[in-house]
Image (cartoon, rainbow, N blue to C red):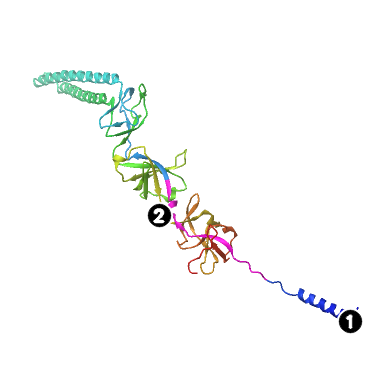
């Protein structure tokens, strides 16, 4: 090899060695896209519960005496007026009891008449000093006892006379028969339920609350009521009654909601829906995919509008819906919240905000 060729080979080797010692070029990775949304008012996530329109007063009607039902004049759903006959018992037993009481009164009256005559005769003999005072006292006591027995017999007759009217069950006030529990030929006891009357007047909505919601609802809380037949109207109402115990079958708590409505246009049995908010202030709502939790603490990722860095923000949660979660505290309405891929984020990571159509989003303050 010639001297010039050897020199060229050495230069080539040195050049290759020097070029291999250079540092690799650093390529910056652009911020990853992240879907961002504003928290929305949670009005759409207000809890709603189906219910049924009921009367404010629903007395259970029953006979005051026992007997066999011989007539039933009304059925469930019939409108009745005050004092209208609803059902009747066999009056024969009551009639016989009344006759027996009348006979006892007659016997007691005869006994009093006899005892009075005897006492008067003994008084005449006492005045003539023909008998002792003790003999007169015995006759007087006999008369007093007979008079007391007459008073008792008359009271028993009055009771039997009243019971004669109890064989007919009458409506205590205007309303609608909501339930019927007996049939003709059935033997009922005194006080056994025969009908349930939905009295005219105030109307309420009966709803069932799940166990998860019972802690956020209290008596007197303001609600809205909507009737199925009048969806365009919302009636202001309040929680009037809340059951302290759950139903053993459904594990729900019964609640009665009173509301202001025209009673003539609201009938018992209509379908209703009750809308309940957790508080008077309207909370915010974010997609379920935006919420994370760690060690029992819920949080969301909020984007800093100046640096596009994500900030872990603790929040206080409300109800969970099918698509959204209610945020009670920790967020502002103008915050930008990461709505997807939150499990891949770290504190301070920069992102490129985009909407759900993958279009770039300009944050306020830029």
Image x and y of residue 358, in percent: 55, 59
Between the residue at mark 1 and the residue at mark 2, the CA separation in whole angstroms equals: 95 Å
Q: Residue at x 26, y 19 (%)?
A: 95
Q: Name the residue under label 1.
A: 3
Judge the density around disc 1: few (<14), some (14-19), many (≥20) Cα neighbours within 10 Å. few
On the question of residue 344 being in view, the answer is yes
Magenta highlight range? 26-48
For this orientation, the residue located farthest to the left is 128
State how many labels appear: 2
**Magenta stretch contains residue 229:** no
Q: Which of 14 and 47 is in front in this view?
A: 14
Q: Which of 261 and 182 is in front in this view?
A: 261
**Magenta stretch contains residue 46:** yes
Q: Residue at x 61, y 66 (%)?
A: 30
Asked whether the residues under the numbered discs 1 and 2 touch, taking CB atoms below 8 Å apart as contact, a structural biologist would say no
Image x and y of residue 169, in percent: 29, 27
Query: Who comes first in sequence, dot 1 or dot 2?
Result: 1
Q: Which residue is drawn at 27% across and 18% down?
A: 96
| Residue 18 vertical position relative to residue 34 in the rendered view, above or below | below
Q: Mark 2 points at which residue?
A: 279
Local secondary structure at mark 2: loop
The quadrant holding residue 354 is bottom right
Q: Quadrant of the N terminus?
A: bottom right
């Amino acid at each position: 090899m010639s001297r010039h060729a050897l020199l060229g080979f050495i230069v080539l080797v040195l050049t290759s060695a020097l070029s291999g010692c250079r540092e690799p070029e650093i390529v910056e990775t652009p911020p990853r896209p992240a879907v961002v949304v504003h928290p929305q008012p949670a009005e759409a996530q207000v809890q709603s519960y189906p219910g049924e329109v009921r009367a404010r007063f629903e007395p259970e009607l029953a006979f005051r005496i026992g007997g066999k039902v011989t007539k039933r004049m009304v059925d469930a759903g019939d409108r009745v007026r005050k004092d209208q006959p609803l059902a009747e018992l066999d009056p024969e037993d009551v009639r016989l009891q009344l006759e027996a009481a009348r006979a006892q009164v007659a016997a007691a009256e005869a006994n009093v008449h006899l005892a009075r005559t005897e006492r008067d005769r003994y008084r005449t003999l006492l005045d003539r000093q023909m008998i002792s005072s003790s003999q007169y006292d015995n006759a007087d006591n006999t008369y007093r006892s007979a008079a007391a027995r007459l008073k008792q017999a008359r009271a028993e007759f009055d009771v039997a006379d009243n019971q004669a009217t109890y064989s007919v069950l009458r409506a205590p006030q205007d309303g609608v028969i909501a339930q019927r529990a007996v049939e003709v030929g059935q033997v009922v006891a005194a006080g056994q339920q025969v009908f349930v009357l939905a009295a005219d007047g105030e109307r309420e909505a009966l709803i069932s609350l799940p166990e998860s919601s019972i802690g956020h609802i209290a008596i007197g809380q303001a609600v809205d009521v909507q009737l199925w037949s009048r969806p365009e109207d919302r009636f202001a109402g309040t929680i009037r009654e809340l059951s302290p115990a759950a139903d053993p079958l459904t594990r729900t708590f019964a609640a009665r909601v009173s509301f202001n409505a025209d009673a003539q246009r609201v009938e018992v049995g209509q379908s209703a829906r009750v809308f309940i908010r957790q508080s008077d202030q309207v909370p915010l709502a974010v997609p379920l995919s935006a919420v994370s939790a760690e060690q029992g603490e819920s949080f969301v990722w909020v984007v800093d509008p100046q640096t596009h860095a994500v900030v872990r923000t603790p929040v206080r949660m409300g109800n969970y819906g099918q698509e959204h979660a209610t945020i009670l505290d920790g967020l502002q309405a103008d915050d930008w919240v990461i709505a997807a891929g939150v499990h891949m984020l770290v504190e301070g990571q920069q992102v490129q905000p985009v909407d759900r159509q993958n279009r770039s989003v300009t944050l306020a303050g830029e």
